[in-house]
Image (cartoon, helix red, strand yellow):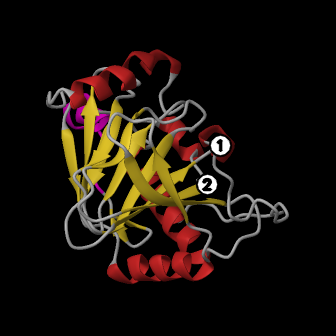
Amino acid sequence: MKTGGFTTPRFDGPECLGEGGSGAWYDAGIIPEEARSGVIAEVLENGGIEPIRDSKSLVAQVFKRAVIDLTREHLYPKTEALGLSLAGRLIVASEALFPAVKNFRPDEVAVQIYPAGTELGLGWHRDHINDLFAVISATLAGSGDIVFSNKPPKQAREAAAQGHPTDAGKITTNTGDAVFFSSSRLYLPTDLNHAIRRAHAVTNIGQGEPRFSLQFRMEVNAGDYDNTPVNHDQPKRSDRPGPSY
């Protein structure tokens, strides 16, 4: 089966809760080169990318970021199309197991660019509670590890600083890969005991080229992350396309 130009995996068993119970699903090499290069060119051409230096972490994280509000007029049609294709893929693949996922419709994109060779790309965290249904992380260039911990973010940071390995698995992401993170409202009320939300971090950015990634979210919450969308002053859209199947 295909959706949005991608081959669709099966989500029909407990293993769909994620490798090692991480609450994240991994699809390798699913984003075509044409889509990757088109989105990267579009993002860089339109600008708005700002450097972020976080000195609050135990290991300082340095990266570049921009946020796009898809509910407002914007100049990123290729970026939005990729998010809608990945959302359609997730819905078709997993709706039988998670019926609520049919309501997933990304309305925010976070662009994150990590320098090549960076030890810590993004520190230990859990995605914000306002993220609905899922968060899709797409790697368009470069590589890096997404590591998971059973501990709360603060304890996970402390454990990492002491050299203790992660205790809930690791996903190595390469160019063209996508990771689907479960989030709030994905599960039926009777399934809440399985609504796993592991703390995770982005580490070990590969040598050679920066890791260029996009995070597609639902329920615009840039303000909750202290970010301002590049198109925050544009008018609201009267009509938006839905996920592509």
Q: Tell me which amino acid carries mark 1.
A: Asn
Instruction: Name the side, left or right, on which 12 lies relative to 137.
Output: left
Between 22 and 121, the one nearer to me in the picture: 121
User: Does residue 195 sit above or below 146 in this rendering?
Assistant: above
Real-space Cα distance between discs 2 and 1?
8 Å
Disc 2, SS: strand
Location of residue 213 (image quadrant): bottom left
Magenta range: 9-21
User: Does residue 154 sit above or below 128 in this rendering?
Assistant: above
| Image coordinates for residue 89, horizontal then vertical, percent | 42, 58
Instruction: Name the side, left or right, on which 230 lies relative to 110.
Output: right
> Which residue does the numbered mark 1 point to in the structure image?
221
| Image coordinates for residue 181, horizontal then vertical, percent | 40, 42
Location of residue 46 (image quadrant): bottom right
How many numbered discs sit on the rendered protein?
A: 2
Callout 2: few (<14), some (14-19), or many (20+) C-alpha neighbours within 10 Å?
Answer: many
State the residue lying farthest toward the front. Answer: 55
Q: Looking at the figure, which quarter contains the N terminus?
A: bottom left
Q: Tell me which amino acid carries mark 2.
A: Glu
Q: Which mark is residue 140?
A: none
| Image coordinates for residue 233, horizontal then vertical, percent | 82, 62
Proximity of marks 2 and 1: CB atoms separated by less than 8 Å: yes
> Which residue does the numbered mark 2 point to in the structure image?
108
Residue lying at 67% horizontally and 65% vertically, measured from the top left: 241
Residue lying at 56% horizontally and 67% vertically, measured from the top left: 49
Disc 1, SS: loop
The answer to which of marks 2 and 1 sits earlier in the sequence is: 2
Residue lying at 52% horizontally and 18% vertically, measured from the top left: 189
14 drawn magenta:
yes
Residue lying at 23% horizontally and 61% vertically, measured from the top left: 117
44 drawn magenta:
no
Let me know if residue 43 appears in the view.
yes
